[in-house]
Amino acid sequence: MAENINSTGPNDHSTLDYDYETEICNKTSIIKFGEIFTPVFFSIVVILSLFGNILVFAILVKFENLRSLTNTFILNLAISDLLFTTGLPFWAYYHMHGWDLGEEACKIVNFIFYLGFYSSSILLMLMTAHRYIAVMNPLSDIVSTTGSYSVIASVVIWVVSFLIASPAFIYTEVKDSNQCVFKDSKWTLWATYKQNALFLLSSVVFIFCYSQIMCRLMRPTAQRRRHKTLKLIFTLMVVFFVEWVPYNVVIFLQSLYTFNEYGDDLDETCERHKRLDYALAFSRLFAYSHCCLNPVFYVFVGVKFKNHLKKMLKSLGRRSSRNSSCSTSSRPNRFTVISITSGEEFSM
């Protein structure tokens, strides 16, 4: 049985020392919840993320110009989400068994997880800003940037993400033989507030850029199919805040208890900590699902990628049909063409 339910990921921070906490508060129900529900949910997210992001990668390589800045952002976002996804099986295992994989693995998994997390956040902000420029000033050189600028942008994004994620490698360790955590509360608080600051910055970028885009599209001179784009923008914003607001609020509230001790009313204090633990468990599920939702909302909602997907499915169908015809020539040659309802492309 895992002994630390609050440290299953690099962004999750226990409110107090777990051993002390479990001695005076009965958290058996929370531990069982984490052991059963979280690994199941993470398994689903991992499968969907691998399928979606690998498909995005394949479509970009096969059909798209990788020198385009837009496609560079999408490609890097897929890689970022895959990095984030690689950490989820380890945290699911941690939920069930504690950390028995050694300190080096603890450091590496935390670093890769953080690297995927922060690079994804940075890329989503840049993609949002790029869309804003494309709508507000479509003749800007940034919109049509290709070649070496795309390479430079990628290098800068990953260098910055590497630097931000590096404390996760330096300042994590295995405590009490089964807890993969930060060395002290100072770095735990630093990780929490860094996460909160990035969320606030992302929120400002999202709200400003998408509100301006919506105002522009609502003008009478905008395209007639603007309503689908407006619905997409609204969906992107709702999904973003549903995923990240609860999680950031919970980890911030937990950080306030880092140096607090239990008061005289032990029952009330324990109940408060239990409620925070349950809130963390649920909010974390929404937040960590972003790696499998990004391909859906940022790629496959566009007409261009839908058409590429249809071409790929048709190609696979023809290949399967030819193979079937060669092996069983007496059978009629047929295959099913999957029809995908087209929508307005928003990835500009």
Image (tube, helix red, strand yellow):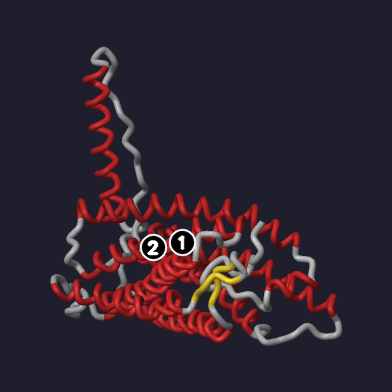
* CA neighbours of label 1 inside 10 A, class few (<14), some (14 to 19), many (20+): many
Q: Which residue is mark 1?
A: 87
Answer left or right for 276 relative to 217: right
Q: Which amino acid type is shown beneath numbered disc 2?
A: Leu
Q: Nearer the viewer, residue 335 or 19?
A: 19
Q: Name which quarter of the figure residue 335 lies in.
A: top left
Residue 201 appearing in the image: yes
Q: Name which quarter of the figure residue 23 lies in.
A: bottom right
Residue 17 image offset from top left, x and y in percent: 67, 77
Q: Which amino acid type is shown beneath numbered disc 1?
A: Gly
Residue 186 image offset from top left, x and y in percent: 55, 86
**In which quadrant of the rendered image does the C terminus lie?**
bottom left
Say whether marks 2 and 1 touch (CB < 8 Å).
yes
Residue depicted at 33% across the width and 62% down the height: 79
Q: Nearer the viewer, residue 340 or 119?
A: 119
The span from disc 2 to disc 1 (Cα, nearest Å) is: 7 Å
Residue 267 image offset from top left, x and y in percent: 85, 75
Q: Which residue is mark 2?
A: 83
Residue depicted at 37% across the width and 63% down the height: 298
Q: How many marks?
A: 2
